[in-house]
Image: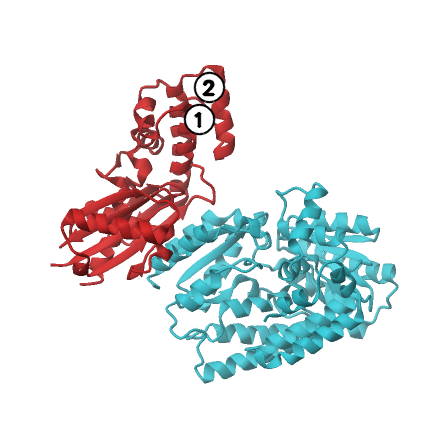
Amino acid sequence: MDIYQLIRSHLAGPLRRRAFKSPWAYRLLKQLVAAQKKRYSWQAAYELLLNTIDQVAAAYLQQGPVVWHNVFFPTEILYGLGLVPFAPEAAAAVAVGLGVAEEAFRVAEGDWVSGESCSFHRLAYGCDRAGYLPPPGAVVCSSHLCDAAPQSLAAAAGYHNVPFYLLDVPHRQDAAAFNYVARQLKSITFSLADALGVPWDQERFQEALLASNTAREHLLAVNRLRGQRPACIRGDEAHGFIYLMLAGFGSGAAAAVYRQLAAELEQRWREQRRAVPEERARLLWLHLRPYYPTEIFNLLEQKAGAVVVFEEMHHVYWEPLDPARPFYSLAGKVLSHHGLGCISRRIEAILAMVDAYQVDGVIHFAHWGCRQSTAGLRLLQDALRDREIPFLNLEGDCVDKSKYAPGATRTRLEGFLEMLRAV
Amino acid sequence: MTVTAGLDLGSLTTKAVVIRDGAIAGSVVMKSGVRSEDIAWRALKAALDQAGIGEEQVDGIVATGYGRVRVPFAHRKVTEITCHARGIYHLWPEVATVIDIGGQDSKVILLDRGGKVRDFVMNEKCAAGTGRFLEVMARSLEVNVEEMGELSLAAPRGASISSMCTVFAESEVVSLVAEGRPVAEIIRGLHEAVAQRVAAMASRVGWEEPVAMTGGVAKNRGVVKSLEDNLGTAIRVPPDPQIIGALGAALLAADSKK
């Protein structure tokens, strides 16, 4: 029984909303998780779950000022200020697992939130209006990559009557852009501190940047190990750690989880403990994946031996941060994302991943509403074709299971595997 | 003597092909219904009877189509993508692009010089541009789906059909009938709409000549003509385009015996 089933079986209806705000729920949850400790095939996943429960508890129990952020805002700032970060988009993915999604989508639809907008944000909206999310003391948002986030989070700040701070990120990587972003980051940082009444603590702020650097080093170690043959972790398992990329940098817990994951990978590789009994193909997964149950990864990895050896979301695209120049180096982190600016930057990064992870085929999951990741697909397909790397685009939805068509998806995946001669 | 069979369980029809030493010995097309296993077995038996071959003489069976997962007596399951490619490669090894329009979906498949699938694309999860779409429209127009091809070829122009959603297109068709547009022109408009959609898919995947068309809709001469006009190339249609997937499946079964 996975954690979501545990929670669903213990909570029903109105109890859910009340449970989120009860300290007892989190204690019970941690005990339930601890009782299942031996059943986690990855100790790192177990530690990640415990840490996530702590973080969720801190947000719902208001153990510090809660700040909502979109998944591309640099969270080092929030940890550095001693705030409690909360990512509504990540909460939307969790809501699917908890069985809350259908209700939340109905709420959003009832409020006339357009079905054409990103379902992550529709779902987060519905969860919020239904009372499932912890109220924010402030909302911060970066404008880069996710088109829907600035509009969605600005509206949320309005509903909660709290300050909204936008980080405006230009689609360039020149000195003017660095200075522009750095100035905004500094301004947002001190505005947050003022608005939320938290003291500025230089040492704590620098610790967040150092923790981020440590996490980065351990993640690079994980990624290097994943480039080895045979793969020792399935993409299905690795995907669960993406949460840290989106909401964990700057916390000591992220560094600890990545350190543990690297150690476990190293051990399995030394023991030649394969991710799948017979590795027939190595795949690169682009963008995200469905968070409701599907056959996709089972069909690829366990049935066909086509291992997702890497996910685009785990790509380390930035240089170490400089605690002596925190805002400038954080600006560098923001601006160096491979999806920002000209499509050729993303293509170059993807081709580098193809090489680094010895990839045989690439699958792009085109999530409904993520226009920035789907608009340049033709150029990406052409670049991969030049390298004779087969490419499959799967159109779908990460959180709205009503848009999932199992038969059509299966035929696409199996047709792709037949192209790779992996079956 | 090597005998193999291919079964293609599509949404509208189930096809069976038996080949003996590389040549088609028997083939059958039946309505699919909802009991995949039963219809698959009956189709196979009918094709074997036609070929005068006993079931114990069959060396291999490959199933394809959406119903392939429910054929327990098949030795292998392979997607329609690989099977249509293999079937056309058998008929015309030089073909570079296969366009398959079946009852429920459309596919454009690129082949390399050796007949392997190089790339493919499928329509998204709705009936737009498929055989189901044409069936629904035929009912609205009170014509047989089999006569739509000839009717449209007689029309001097096609009525404009802007929507490819089957439900919305049907209401457009009803409006056009109410306006008094000739049925033949409406049908040609529907064919042109299908052709535009399929041509866009072909472009997405980077189609090349020569082009062949398979699936039940390839029997509709009007759709083929509209697609040829849209792509600007001749399209080859096998004498029995519906069975190409099953033929490819049977050939794949034979290939694995070599």
What element does badge 1 sit on? helix
Residue A344 in the image, given as x and y percentages of width and height? 50, 53
Subunit of mark 1?
A: B
Residue shown at the point (68%, 47%) measured from the top left:
A106
Q: From mark 2 to mark 1, how far is it between C-alphas?
A: 9 Å
- Image check: B33 left or right of A124? left
The C terminus of chain A lies in which quarter of the figure? bottom left
Please name which of the two marks, 2 or 1, marks the residue nearer to the observer. 1
Can residue A246 be seen at all in this image of the molecule?
A: yes
* Above or below B224: residue A68: below
Question: At 69% from the left edge and 62% from the top edge, which residue is drawn?
Answer: A74
User: At label 2, which amino acid type do we have?
Assistant: Val
User: What x and y, as percent, mark residue A289?
Assistant: 54, 58
Q: Are marks 2 and 1 in contact (CB under 8 Å)?
A: yes
Q: Residue furthest top?
A: B180
Question: Residue B197's spot in the image, x, y percent?
Answer: 42, 36
- B87 above or below A219? above
> What colour is chain B?
red
Q: Quadrant of residue B237?
A: top left
**Left or right of residue A389: residue A158:** right
Left or right, A320 with respect to B125, comes to right
**Colour chain A is painted in:** cyan
* Disc with the residue nearer the chain's start (2 vs 1): 1
- The chain that hosts pointer 2 is B
The answer, for residue A252, to whether it is visible in the render is no
Taking A272 as reference, is B86 above or below it?
Answer: above
* Residue at which label 1 appears: B140
Vertical comparison of B209 with A208: above or below = above
Query: Residue at coordinates 26% horizontally, 40% vertically from top-left?
Result: B241
From the top left corner, tell me how far across and down residue B248 is, in percent.
25, 51
Q: Amino acid at mark 1?
A: Ser
Which residue is under mark 2?
B177
